[in-house]
Image: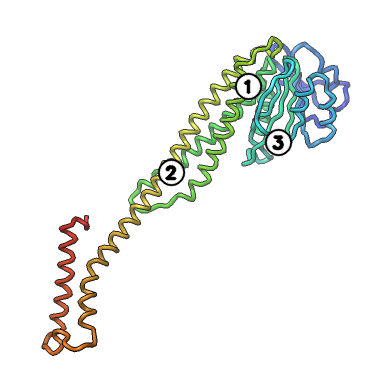
Amino acid sequence: MVQEMTDPGSAVPGLLWAYRFRNDGTAKNLGLNVSRNECSRTDGWIWLHFSLSDERAKRFIADFDGFPEPARATLLTADEHVNVCISDGVVHGIFVDLQRDLAGITDGTGKLHFAFNDHVLVSTRRAALHSVEAARQSIEAGNSIPAAVGLIEEIVSQYCITIERMMSAIADQIDEIEDRVLEKRRNDDRQKLIPVRRLVMKLHRQLLASRGMFHRLESAVDSRLPVGLAETATQIAQHLDSLDHACVVLQDRARLVHDEIVSKINAETNRSLHVLSTLSVLLMPPTLVAGAFGMNTRDVPFAQTDGGFWFALALCGLASAVAYGLLKKLDILN
């Protein structure tokens, strides 16, 4: 378990938590009173996590001399685009994450700004992030992380676990809709598919940006880079690739189910129109006959004949029979 440590340093403004990791990966919780000397130690490494809602935290990071200026700018920037850069052996970038509140994961998306070398990892955020908190809880539970790059791997792993759960729930929703589509009775579940497709598309965009970010780190060459960066980046990229492939499969399934619903609705509409068109064709000749006998003109057939109404009615039936025969012969009724 993580051990508490009393430190004579002063509280760092905006600091949410700080951990000192020994060489074997075990951690100590430094609390919020962290001295600057603690950040300059080379035995093991330290993780400092800040909230940028505190303006004093921005000033502290801007004055932090452990990172070059580009890395400090990444930690403080308002730009939320996922990216990664390397400056003087320091890896810095922005990673997408899911927001959280006291009730758990929310629908919002946040960004984790980070910068690290072999001895210091600083991360910042504007809203509470799920994967970062899950990584902290993992550390509190005794998970050892020997290197700073391992913390990035742990955060991404927690993110991937959450995405896998979300995708599993999405797959179940698509299964239910698909089962209803295959039933004989009509089911229009297009409205239920809209939030599903929107969420899958959102996850795909996140995964696409994240996997590209770590693929760029795979080929990074610099003797000053953190130890194990390329290998860790490769593992993370492969995991994200697998998730993105599964996400694309879900996208295709949702699109196919939507097309199947539309196709089924169109087929039923066409059948209804076919029936109405057939009835119109069958009733058109009798209507013409009835209209002819209903004209107020002289020389109307059967006008003075006993049973003339029945002769006219029979003529209407004959006209319908002739129309039906023509439709049958032309194979229009099938």
Answer with left or right where residue 331 lies relative to residue 180: left
Callout 1 amino acid: Glu
Separation of marks 2 and 3 at Cα, in angstroms:
33 Å
Q: Quadrant of residue 80?
A: top right
Residue holding disc 2:
176
Check residue 278 in the rendering and tell me which mark sits there, or answer none. none
- Residue, far front: 298
- The quadrant of the rendering that contains the N terminus is top right
Separation of marks 3 and 1 at Cα, in angstroms:
19 Å
Check residue 153 in the rendering and tell me which mark sits there, or answer none. 1
Q: Going from the N terminus, do you reach mark 2 or mark 3 first?
A: 3
* Above or below: residue 15 compared with residue 143: below
The residue located at (14%, 72%) in the rendering is 318
- Using a 10 Å C-alpha cutoff, classify the residue at mark 3 as few (fewer than 14 neighbours), some (14 to 19) or many (20 or more): many
Check residue 128 in the rendering and tell me which mark sits there, or answer none. 3
The residue located at (62%, 41%) in the rendering is 107
